[in-house]
Image (spheres, helix red, strand yellow):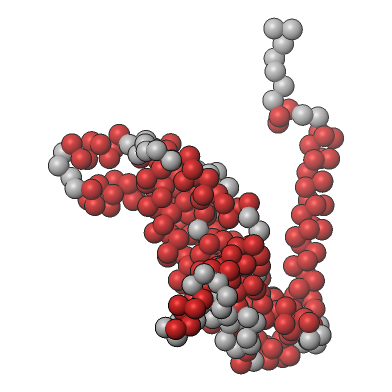
Amino acid sequence: MSGQTPIRPNQDPGWLRTLILSTVVLFMSVMVGLPLITVFAVGLSKGLGPAMEAIREHDALAAVGLTLFIAAIAVPFNAVFGVCASWAIAKHSFRGKSFLVSLIDLPFSVSPVVAGLVYVLVFGLQGWFGPWLIDHNIKIIFAVPGIVLATVFVTFPFVARELIPLMEAQGSDEEEAAVSMGASGLATFLRVTAPNIRWGLIYGVLLCNARAMGEFGAVSVVSGHIRGQTTTMPLHVEILYNEYDFVGAFAVAGLLCLMALATLALKTLVEIARPEVGGHAV
């Protein structure tokens, strides 16, 4: 037995490789390909004109603008947080480190709807800070600030969870050498740490952006569904679908899919440029 050469995965029988590949292709076709085709087919079922009209409609343009605005706030915020959190966790030892990592993973395990309800309980009219917010004429729930908070919550793990394993694998020898040569903390980060993590940071930002644009559950709870004001693209799709405007709903959904596919294309280009990134994502 000890003299036998172990069988590597790429030496599996041809029929087994074919079966596995066919299963993967079939699953992806049914679960991913078919829904995408359906979205574009229904959206264009009456032609390109009605689909474009649905996208150019005032409420649809407002939803697109709000979606991009929310992502423009949430993604940079989470990028800064992710860098700081990963730096603290990977480069330093302190009490409560494991607890901090667990908190970062929390949005992966908590339903987005629950997260939205928490913000309602905290900032709503009957919430902890509700009376104070009313007295100072500050509106968070059923307004843009609430949508920003909910989106930040559900997306903040992506950059951090991409960078933490990357920084841990790189160690701290280069940073320690830079400090010993008289470099300041900021100079060490900009000249040593940042170049080493830039591809992982880009990858994490792309994942964060994709989730920010497509978030539905938490945003639905805190938005109030005010058309033209607090409806993002996923919420606008739901409203149109509930009104039986299937062409409009799937046309806007198709635009959201195109934005997601563009993000996926950028993600693929990053993986091609640096194949080692992407292996740390959760």
* Residue 231 pos. (x, y %): 61, 81
Q: Nearer the viewer, residue 77 or 61?
A: 77
* Residue 109 pos. (x, y %): 63, 51
**Residue at image point 45% right, 61% down:** 78
Left or right side of 131 for 110: right
**Residue at image point 77% right, 81% down:** 241
Q: Which image quadrant is residue 82 in?
A: bottom left
| Total count of labels | 0
Task: Reply above or below: 4 against 44.
Answer: above
Q: Which image quadrant is residue 170 in?
A: top left
Task: Reply above or below: 255 against 166.
Answer: below
Q: Nearer the viewer, residue 120 or 246?
A: 120
Q: Which image quadrant is residue 73 in?
A: bottom left
Q: Quadrant of the N terminus?
A: top right
**Residue at image point 28% right, 49% down:** 189
Q: Nearer the viewer, residue 128 or 46?
A: 128
Residue 109 seen in this snapshot: yes
Residue 265 seen in this snapshot: no
* Residue 207 pos. (x, y %): 55, 59
**Residue at image point 62% right, 86% down:** 226
Left or right side of 172 for 154: right
* Residue 216 pos. (x, y %): 65, 69
Task: Reply above or below: 28 against 100.
Answer: below
